Amino acid sequence: MLVRAVLPFLALVVFPHMGARAQPAMETFQAQWQMSCIIRRDKFDLVLPTAMRRNGVDMWIVIDHGRGTEPLMLDLGIESAYGQGIYIFYDSGEGRVERYTLGGPGSSDLSALCGAYDPLPPIMEGADGGELSQLQSIVFERDPRRIALNIVPENIQGEGVHVADGLSHKDYNVLSRELGERYVERFVSSLNLLTDFHGEHVASEIVEMSKVADITRRGLERALSNEVIKPGQTTYNDVARWLEEYREAMGLRRTWYPGLRFVKPGSTGYNALSGNGMERVIQRGNLVYVDWGLKRNNFATDLKRTAYILGEGETEPPADLLRAWDAAMAVREIIRGHVRVGRTGREQLDELKKLVRDAGFVYTDLEAASDVPGVEVNIGMHGMGNLAHDVVAGVFELWPELTAYEIRPNAFLSFEYRIFSPSDPDPDYKIHISIEENVMVTERGIEWLHPPQDRLLLVR
């Protein structure tokens, strides 16, 4: 097909000539590095003390096995060239948290320039008068009661838990040998500490997250327009490739390859189909949504945008589709008004289920329509920020372990939910509207990090 052949060529031609309105300006490496340093300093000063004290942790040791194999590397500095890049945080219970880097080659110089770490203290003598390593000296002199390491118990599951599980078996053995059995008995998992550390955000993080979220939003809205979609010609993969060209032009990484859902021609209603049909052609009368995200400067997005492909002679979507959209917007306001910081995800999810039912909807724990009459609602709000699905408090049933955590101040959440509304042609089919925005939670409730989708996008 012509569009399949032309779209990749158009992407190469159009992107170099994008105007300021079309392509957000991208900062230099230096600008992004400076912002990442501000984030580290503020997180270590303002968030880490609370996270350590809430979880009874005196010391946190993170070891990069080399070349960024530690999942938290970008939270702490940059990848070491090889060897062990060691990061030590100590909280005396008062004032600031001490922080030291024993980084391997390739990271120490930049870390020093960042100003996020303290000068290394003098190395003390061992009890036998022998020379200690820098690691031993820091630990022995401070004598912490509980030392958090990036290890996760085998029974723990959930999205993003791998970021608290980066310590290799080899480095665990090295650490155990260096510190001895006395301190091995004090090792604990950093999971709860990290959940609080990742779950609370400072002003500079809000700035960075909103930038990449808006870049993602703009790309999705352009992809679901006549700029990209030609009904009867454009395929799933054409749209996905256009988004990937957009991403490459921005110099960003993906959270995942674009996921697109739409209804095949001739089906009754607008029930979304999924599968491997990447060469399916988008036709008039389809309801289309794309799920996609980008990574920039250690922040990741996860957004959806939904569009209706107008049928022949149509100037607006069908009435049942508009009713479904209105129902989705009504559910959005219910959620916005009742999610707050300082409460667990479980408390808030249970409350939202009741509020949804009180508003006349049917709540379902399934992410698919059933044969129950009425408009069904499913809420699946996962944590995000440094990962698109981060190991922080969630308001969803998919990973109930994460609902036990408290939503921290300025938490980032994926504002994700689905509604299933009966269609006029055949009430046995339900129109699937899937909403996903990236938001911040404060004591006031949910606040937008980027412009949300208030109405259906239309492709003419």
Image (cartoon, rainbow, N blue to C red):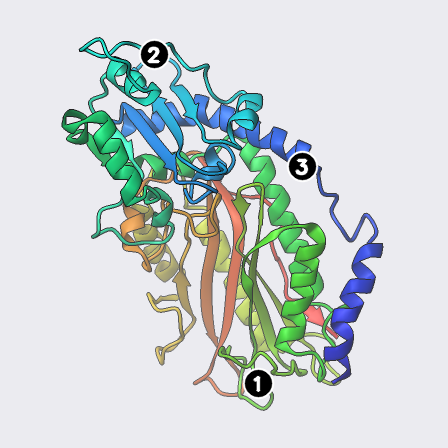
- Asked if disc 3 and disc 1 are in contact, CB closer than 8 Å, the reply is no
Secondary structure state at the residue bearing disc 2 = loop
The reply, left or right, for residue 315 in relation to residue 350 is: right
Q: Where does the image place residue 52, in percent across and percent down from the top left?
A: 31, 27
Residue 220 falls in which quadrant of the image? bottom right
What residue sits right under mark 2 in the picture? 123
Identified by mark 1, the residue type is: Lys
Task: From the viewer's side, name the closer residue of 65 and 18.
Answer: 65
Query: How far across and how far down the image is residue 189, in percent?
Result: 25, 38
Q: Identify which amino acid the numbered label 3 is placed on.
A: Phe
First along the sequence among labels 3 and 1: 3
Query: In front here: 426 or 228?
Result: 228
Residue 136 in view (yes/no): yes
Residue 83 position by quadrant = top left
Residue at the disc numbered 1? 264
Disc 3, SS:
helix
Q: CA distance from mark 2 to mark 3?
A: 35 Å
Which badge, 2 or 1, is on the more N-terminal residue? 2
Which quadrant is the C terminus positioned in?
A: bottom right
In the image, what residue type sits under mark 2? Ile
Label ID, residue 29: 3
- Give whichever of 71, 314 is nearer the camera: 71
Relative to 253, say whether 316 is above or below: below
Q: For numbered disc 1, what is the local secondary structure?
A: loop
Label annotation for residue 16: none
Badge 3, how many Cα within 10 Å: few under 14, some, many 20+?
few
